[in-house]
Image (cartoon, rainbow, N blue to C red):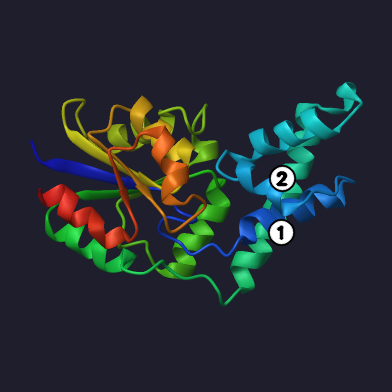
């Protein structure tokens, strides 16, 4: 059975990320009195950001009454503003090598292209607009479009439903972190492909048992064509 859909992560998988997301998150937390090292922030960037904020607060906030949904929302709103300001003005927004040519090859084979992300929809839509990807992908689902973000399969399931991908159809998930891999496993994807262009090196991806690990997104086509 041929592959009908490939779902890609964004930052670190298809979109270059020079740690801007983590630095923006670090700044938002600092604005509320939490001074964090980037090495403490980086491991959390694979999660949807309100959950990452909650994880930080649970670790560093002694007053448990302060850790409320309203406070998390307030910090997340500040993070989103920082990210929107960055992605609106930055000249550093660019696709990772061979991503757009791979999109074109997938389109030529009649394979649907989906993006899912830990970003909120407003950030993700801005990135897509800056890259002029509106006509290069079929669909994007963001973490705030679903009840549960990664590693739950909700985003992939929503993409499949909207594109009329049937349960028996073959789907591929591509991402640069363990939550991408676990999302693909939980969604029952045929291939779950870790890519080393983002947060994790090969040896850091291996313990999560993706079906494949690649160093360049263009290697995806050999897997699909095999």
Tag 2's secondary structure? helix
User: With respect to residue 172, does 70 lie above or below?
Assistant: above
Residue plotted at (54% across, 62% down): 17
Query: What residue appears at the point 29 percent right and 34 percent down from the top-left corner?
Result: 160
Which quadrant does the N terminus fall into? top left
Residue 186 % position (x, y): 37, 25
Above or below residue 20? Residue 168 is above
- Using residue 94 as the reference point, say whether residue 156 is left or right of it: left
Reply above or below: 210 against 132.
above
- The residue to which callout 2 is attached is 40
Camera-nearest residue between 176 and 31 = 176
Q: Residues within 10 Å of mark 2 (few under 14, many from 20)?
A: few
Earlier-in-chain disc, 1 versus 2: 2
Q: Nearer the viewer, mark 1 or mark 2?
A: 2
Residue 187: x and y in percent read 34, 28
- Position of 152 with respect to 26 (left or right) is left
Q: Position of residue 34 (x, y in %)?
A: 86, 45
Horizontal side of 64 relative to 28 (left or right) equals: right
Which numbered circle lies on residue 194? none
Residue farthest toward the front in the current orientation of the protein = 203
Viewer-closest of 208 and 114? 208
Instruction: Give SS at disc 1.
Output: helix
Q: What residue is pinned by disc 1? A: 82
In-front residue for pair 51/140: 51
Query: What residue occupies the far top of the structure in this picture?
Result: 65
Please tell me whether residue 54 is drawn above or below residue 10 in the rendered image: above
Q: Residue at x 72, y 32 (%)?
A: 54
Residue at image location 21% in from the left, 25% down from the top: 167
Structural distance between the alpha carbons of marks 1 and 2: 19 Å
Image x and y of residue 212, in percent: 28, 44
Does the residue at mark 1 contact the one at mark 2 (Cβ under 8 Å)? no
Label 1: how many residues lie within 10 Å, few (<14), some (14-19) or many (20+)? some
């Amino acid at each position: 059975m041929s592959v009908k859909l490939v779902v890609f992560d964004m930052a670190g998988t298809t979109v270059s990320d020079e740690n801007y997301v983590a630095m923006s998150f670090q700044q938002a937390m600092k604005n509320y009195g939490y001074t964090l090292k980037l090495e403490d922030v980086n491991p959390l960037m694979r999660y949807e950001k309100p959950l990452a904020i909650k994880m930080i607060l649970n670790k560093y906030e002694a007053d448990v009454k302060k850790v409320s949904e309203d406070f998390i929302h307030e910090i997340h709103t500040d993070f989103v503003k920082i990210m929107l300001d960055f992605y609106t003005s930055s000249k550093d927004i660019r696709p990772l090598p061979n991503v757009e040519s791979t999109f074109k090859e997938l389109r030529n084979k009649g394979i649907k292209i989906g993006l899912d992300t830990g970003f909120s929809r407003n950030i993700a839509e801005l990135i897509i607009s800056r890259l002029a990807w509106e006509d290069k992908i079929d669909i994007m689902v963001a973490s705030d479009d679903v009840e549960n973000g990664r590693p739950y399969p909700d985003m992939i399931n929503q993409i499949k439903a909207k594109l009329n991908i049937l349960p028996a159809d073959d789907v591929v998930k591509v991402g640069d972190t363990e939550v991408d891999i676990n999302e693909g496993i939980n969604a029952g994807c045929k291939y779950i492909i870790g890519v080393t262009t983002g947060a994790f090196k090969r040896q850091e991806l291996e313990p999560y048992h993706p079906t494949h690990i690649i160093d360049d997104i263009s290697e995806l086509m050999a897997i699909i064509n095999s």
